[in-house]
Amino acid sequence: MFKMALRQILAYKQRTIITILLTLAATYMFVFLNGFAHGSRMIMIDAGVKLYPGFIKVINREFDETPSFENLIFDMEDTLKKVKSAEGVEVATARFETFALYSTDEETIGGMFTAIQPDSEAKISKLKESLIEGEYLSSDDTNALYIGNEFASRLNVKLGDTISFISTGADYSFAADNIVIKGIFKTGLFSFNNSAAFMNKKYFDEVMASKNIATSIVVKPVSEDDDEILNITQNIQNNLSDEFWAQSYFITMEELIDAMIIDEVFGYFQLGIFFVVIFFVIAIYNYLNIYGRIREFGILKSIGTTPAQITKMLFLEIIILGSIGVGIGSGIATWNLKYLNENPVDIHKLYGDAIDIEEYMKEYDMVMIDAMPADYNLESIFWHTLFVYIATILSVLYPIIMVNRLKPVEAMHHV
Amino acid sequence: MFENILIKMAFKNIFRRLSRTILTATMISVSLISLMIMAGLYEGMIVQMVDATTKSDSGEVLIQAKDFRETEQIKYSIKDSKPIEEIIKNDPRVESYVTKIRAQGLIATAGYAKNVEIIGVDLEKDVKQSKLDNYIMSGELTFGKHDRGVIIGQTLAKDLKISVGKKVIITTQDINNEVVSIALKVQAITNSTGLAKSLLMSKTKLQKTLGLGNSISQICIIMKNRADSTTFANELKLQDLKDLVVYDWTELYSMLKEMEVMMTTINIISYAFVFLVASLGIFGVVLVSVLERIREFGIMMAIGTRFRDIAKMIIFESLIISTIGYIAGAIIGALALLYLSAYGIDFSAFDDAFLMFGMDPHMKAIIRPAFFTDTLIAIYIATILAVLLPIRSLKKRKPVESIKEL
């Protein structure tokens, strides 16, 4: 049976070449485009998480619904200790995030005002490595401010300048002080650079009456694997009372993750169109081929070949053709994905003049990334390849049913 | 006369192998339906984004004081807008215009604060232009008694966890650089994508609070036909407007324009790819159909039919199959687009993600005549290209000689 299938494949070269080429193209497109697009989505999420929000965040459960000073983490040291003792936690840091009005002689602008623990913060977010001027904060800093470059520009201040801030303290008192610009940072997120400023928490606590109080505790887990992150989040939650809520980035970054899901759905829709037409063409060629061999099937039936054997032979033909096309297509796609995973595409080169990518990221408040690596995930490649393979095999279903319906004599008379 | 006979023969021939004809026509119609839905939804998405941004925010032509756009400082305001308003009012291409105040500030609830863009509008006029009444999620479209109310964007409301009826404190800087605060009540929450993170309040009240007198920050103009916006903006730029700057929407939102171009490119590539593959399918069908009738063609030629006429008949056959596929695809595609333009696809479960990109979560398609004309041309080109090789192959095999094989 296998030999017969092989002979048929060699005898009908046109069908063989077209089926192989089309399955190859379909597999390559499906596996490669998915891997490449998925890689770019993953890097956007990864860059967004690592910039500042963090993989895991602990807040007072009520703070999510009512983000007021009534619902903070009041015994910060104790909570921080419990968080750090959870299995899978590498580093944890406390933050106090609020808003303030910043004033110079001429300007008054509202912006984020956040207290951080400089040493542990440096291990979790990209704040320290985003320094472009001056110095990063230290744990013994007093009235020093670490400010985004765009924010500094809006306030028209430079390194060493003094500005005033007015805010509400954790005890609802009026808080104000003069602060000196110690460092200026620039991250890949324009809106963050445009509105964020940081202060050493020790000094911040004195001014804002927030000693041993935090709005959140942010955690760097030992692993960045999604399942591990969920396990570690659960471990942290187990160490805390119900008053607190340990949230993974699937919750804190839900908006971005949803956006990526939508992008993925649209990507599949677009590929689906190509797919449908490709498999119609494969089906047409197989149909034409099988149809052209009806007399041959009639003879085979008349000499006792059963419909099951004919079905088996036709399936064998498409399995051989599909294996070649899908195998080559998947192989090339896998190799390309591996290469682009190790040598990410320069995003500026990818879009060229077609789109101002920096402006695009700024417009949609997304973290600017310079390079896009492809997602080299063998499991994902396997499932996408299998999908094309099954679709290819199913494309001969209709012609097989049609051939098996014919009676031997009827088939032999077929012109 | 003979052409009619050829068409009749072509018709009869395509029904000889009905399942083959149906398969090919189905391939064409399915491709067409998918492409039309894709193009309709993508273009609809862009139109919605442009509409949401221009109507609720800047208009299609925007006039601001020099330096306002770069600095967003209220000191750069339009002191006397009357002369320019006269020009706008008297231009027949202008549909409507509104004047607005914009300022940056801080919005605070009892326990939380956030920076915010404050927009002062004349609500009655603004609703006519922005159709804001269609985008109210909760509350009433009013600034309340003595203009003490605000309308806030969906994202801002979510961030601050506030609802209709709650009090908020707005703090900002007035024209003399003094910090000023006002307490206002949330009257409504809007899901207009252009206002997701903004706050709307009475223009008069904001003018008083900021000490602006009658000055305004910008004039937002909507044209009767969006295509006129660039010309109109250019004409205004040529006038002596002193310290005013004019922008048309493509300058303000170059990203939207670039996205429009990118979507068109994606659509063209998709159309080209789909019809290239489809032409491969048509080619296979025509080739087999031609080769299995080679003796039939030989007989036709033996009784005087010219090869040119046989070629014509083969082309007619292919065009008829394509036309059947096109008609079926165009009808189903049009119905699908009509449905999607009237009811759309509701992605409100992902509304935050859509708002992040300034997109309406209730995605609606648009229908353009070009969807039908362009695809018809593409299908016919693909068909003609697909039959050329089979005809050439037939000619090489010399049909007349094939009679001898009988």
Image: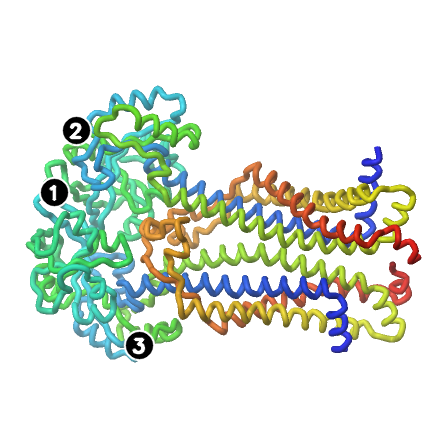
Residue type, label 2: Gly
Helix, strand or loop under label 1: strand
Residue at the spot of label 2: B213
What chain is tagged by disc 3? A
Residue at the spot of label 3: A222
Q: Is residue A293 found left or right of B114 in the rendered image?
A: right
Q: Marks 1 and 3: CB-CB under 8 Å?
A: no
Residue at the spot of label 1: B179
Residue type, label 1: Val
Q: Is residue B327 visible?
A: yes
Residue type, label 3: Val
Which tag is nearer the camera, tag 1 or tag 3? 3
Residue A201, given in percent of the width and then of the height, sits at 13, 65
Helix, strand or loop under label 3: loop
Q: Nearer the viewer, residue A112 or A45?
A: A45
Q: State the separation of the CA atoms marked 2 and 1.
A: 17 Å
Q: How many residues crowd mark 3 within 10 Å: few (<14), some (14–19), many (20+)? A: some
Q: Which corner quadrant holds the N terminus of chain B?
A: top right
Q: Nearer the viewer, residue B249 or B283?
A: B283
What chain is tagged by disc 1? B
Q: Is residue B246 found left or right of A128 in the rendered image?
A: right
Residue B31, given in percent of the width and then of the height, sits at 62, 50
